[in-house]
Amino acid sequence: MRKFWILIKYEWLNFKADKGLLILTTLTLFAGLYGIYYGTTELEKQRENIAKLDVLTEHNVEEMKEKFPGEADAGDIGYYHSTFAVNHPDSWASLSMGQRDVNPYYIKLRLLNLQSQLYDTENINPLKVLSGNFDLAFVLVYLFPLLIIGLCFNILSVEKEQGTLPLLLSQPIGLPLIVGAKLSFRMMIVLGLALLLSVLAMVWGQVMPDVRVALWLGVVLLYCLFWFGVAFLVAALQKNSAFNAVTLLGVWLMLTIIIPALLNVYVAVKQPIPQALELTIKQREVVHGGWDKPKRETMDQFFALYPQYTDTTDIKVRFVWRWYYAFQHLGDVAVADLAEAYQEGLQARHQLVEKLNVLSVPVNVQGVFNAMAGSDLPSHLAFMQSATQYHDSLREFYYPFLFNNVPFTHADYEKEPRHSFTSSPDFATAYSGLFKLVICVLVVFGIGFVLFRLKEASVK
Amino acid sequence: MIKSIARKEFISTLRDSRFMALSIIVLLLLLAATVVGLNSYRTLQEERDVAQQTVNDQFANSVDRHPHRMAHYGSYAFRPKSSISFLDFGLDSYTGAAVFMEAHRQNSANFSQAQQSSSLIRFGEMTVAFVLQMLIPLLIIFLCFGAFTQEKETGTLKILLSQGISLRQVAWAKITGYSKVVGLVVAPALVLASLLLFGRGGFELEGDTLLRLLLFILFYLVYFFIFIVLSVVVSSLHQRSNTALVTLLGIWILCCVIIPKASANLGANLYTTPTKAQMDADVHEEVAKGVDGHNSQDERAEALKKELLKKYKVSTLEELPVNFDGVWMAMGEEQSSKVFQEHFDELTDIFDKQNSISEYASLLNPYLAVRHLSMGMAGSDFSHYTHFQNKAEEYRYNLAQGLNNIQTTQIKYGEKETRLSSDTWKNFKPFTYETPHAGWALGNHLVSLLALLVWLVLVSTVGIRLIDKTKVA
């Protein structure tokens, strides 16, 4: 054991003297700090924007009260008044922003047909979303492997190339101890840095301290171990430093860039999404066709869905709100199948990625992070569903006014349902991802050990 | 002598099986990316063509309607993919494909590819541009890192120099040799891409497309050349191949992975984007209260009434020869469009400012320079997207005003039951979009163009001069 610590001590001295390694580590540290800063400020911005929505709603209600000073027709209110369905972030989202920048985190809703309102995008700068988030998850998933590669690519080969390996081996220590000590020393640095950044991010982002603390740290630890395993495996091949560097970088390139890009192509072909374009076009036809159809026909269709409002009086005038909202409603009913197919298509696409992510550890880990932070696609789909339910509840709220001819008073604004949804973590995905990660780590180290045993240690 | 060094590098590289294996992988990826790109281009383009045709037909064949109903019925603009965007998807996957164009309201483009994908797309897309921008430089690094260090390690550099050749001449000779090798890897893919573009791709051999393609290729050749010279220079400054390689890989990671992301995120942090909800509310308020904040909508309507009654010397709106509703609607459209356009321009301006951080960062980073130029030539950058949105808005405005005009002249005041024959709608020309020309595209990336040229000049003058400092021993 003493020999091990002596080796560690000399590694430390070496490390301190090597400017390149120091720079690399410091760079990673700063990238991590920037990632934490970026994640927290970005999430703070989203929270502020969400808070401002309340102000906008209030403002809108004030305006409505001014516009309709006395009792109003609920039809007018439903038409001019808007509210928001809001997707509050989970506190963990500052560590892993996931798809929260691409997908809108609020939806502006009126009583009109839902489908034409559901897909409005937020103001996003496409160049920014193309570049992606520089959050802690990015630093851990992309940059930490590079740090590990930088620290470990010449772990054994450098001793050979400098001619120090024979000297070392002439001492009463074996090769496994040397490699073990060197690897342990680097692990201490990298894991220390990763854990430090993670804890800092959790404190800074004021995350909900639950089981995810352990889960996150565990995944980070295992992910770093995976890359150390890869470095160990390559070192076991006992080639020169240049070969190691190229091989390790090649593995990084394959796992973090090329395989995901190819998978993306495969998924797009294998699981095509029924285009939402078709849905909106069809809905427009149905909704606008509503104006031209005989009113009786529309109302009968609607009363079939809402028998409680059935009446036998024919609408004689050119325009009444209850007829207008009836054909808006039927517009949604007409495309319900397409809307469902679209959402299911997205869900299926995500599940396919879940299945394929065994091919790339970084994709898996990114998925685990996003699932934990509630910032992945399923979480957005859950929000869309929640927004749909909210729209239903708005309908339920307004229909009695419309169909029973109840005037809408100022006091009724208070009674209007409000929406709130907070992304929740998906532990099932996280645990299955963790399980896959453990297997990958074991496999890599297993192969590394076997190779080390098989290959005769050569000093030259 | 220079020629023979160049030939030696060329031939010895071809004999290096590891390098050849890497080249073949890169070449295969390049070919795969071309096919994938073309395939995805065709699918998307077809989808959008069909959709555009559908909505155009629906509009032209609409039943008899009141013109204002048609204005609300509206139309869609689907963004056609630029013909060489199959080489570089650029921002296309992140920008919306469809704009709904209706009266009173300006909608943004919805339905981007990114919204329909899982997080996989964030790891990058397999496109020709991706291989050219990120993988070829890596290949170049592996090719060139030992340019000088290997000669030093084997002691051949001294022998070479004793032949009466200067260090710089050695460098240029090596650069020439490596350039040939890179050309050998890249050329087949570029030729294939061009053939697909103009041959079976079904594109017409248009002057502008050709110019865009040529510039596209040219920019990448300059980019590769910069990387080759840079790698040779870095190699000359090191004594050992290992350290030269590690340094070069570090530069690659910084240029291709870290800086692009950091600069885009920094831009977004520095200039805050207003939310859509806030923007909508602001537009709504300004339209309702009047642009100048003085007279409200009702006051403006009163003023217009008085003005028209006076102009036509009649006492009631019914007596007017024009339909007041139509005139009022047209005025409202004009006002609201102006307000919206102001806000839209403001937003575009903020995005431009955010993106300018990346543009200026290209002075530090040739990768960013070529990325912007490549997207620009492929017609998949931000300015092309804005151009499309502006064209769609222009069409929307003219459509709404055309329908308002019909209401003004053909419909009686207060008459809401009148239906105009469906032939009326056939007179409206459907939305068409033409990509602006290459010169326009280039003009949007002058900083990047300058950056690429500065890099070219810097590496081939200052860079090469640095080689003199190398320690031969």
Image: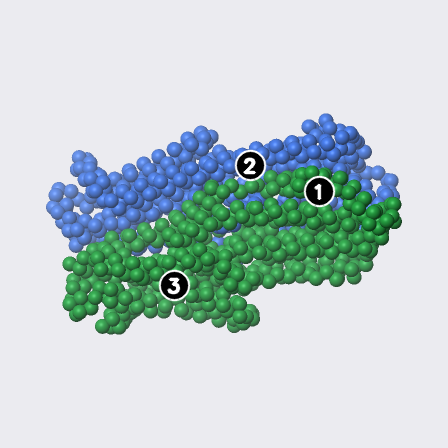
Q: Which mark is residue A112?
A: 1
**In the image: residue A303, left or right of residue B457:** right
Q: Which mark is residue B431?
A: none
Between discs 2 and 1, the one toward the N terminus: 2
Label 1 sits on a secondary structure element that is loop
Q: Quadrant of residue B146?
A: bottom left
Could you tell me which residue is drawn at 35 percent across and 34 percent down? A196
Q: Position of residue B149 (x, y in %)?
A: 22, 59
| Res A6 visible | yes
Real-space CA distance between mark 2 and mark 1, rounded to the nearest whole angstrom: 24 Å
Q: Which chain is blue?
A: A
Could you tell me which residue is drawn at 51 percent across and 41 percent down? B272
Looking at the picture, does residue A240 appear above or below residue B16?
Answer: above
Label 2 CA crowd tier, 10 Å (few <14, some 14–19, many 20+): some
Q: Amino acid at mark 2?
A: Asn
Q: Which mark is residue B222?
A: 3
Q: Nearer the viewer, residue B350 or A140?
A: B350
Circles 2 and 1 on the same subunit:
yes
Q: Which chain is green?
A: B
Q: Which mark is residue A49?
A: 2
Between disc 2 and disc 1, the foreground one is: 2
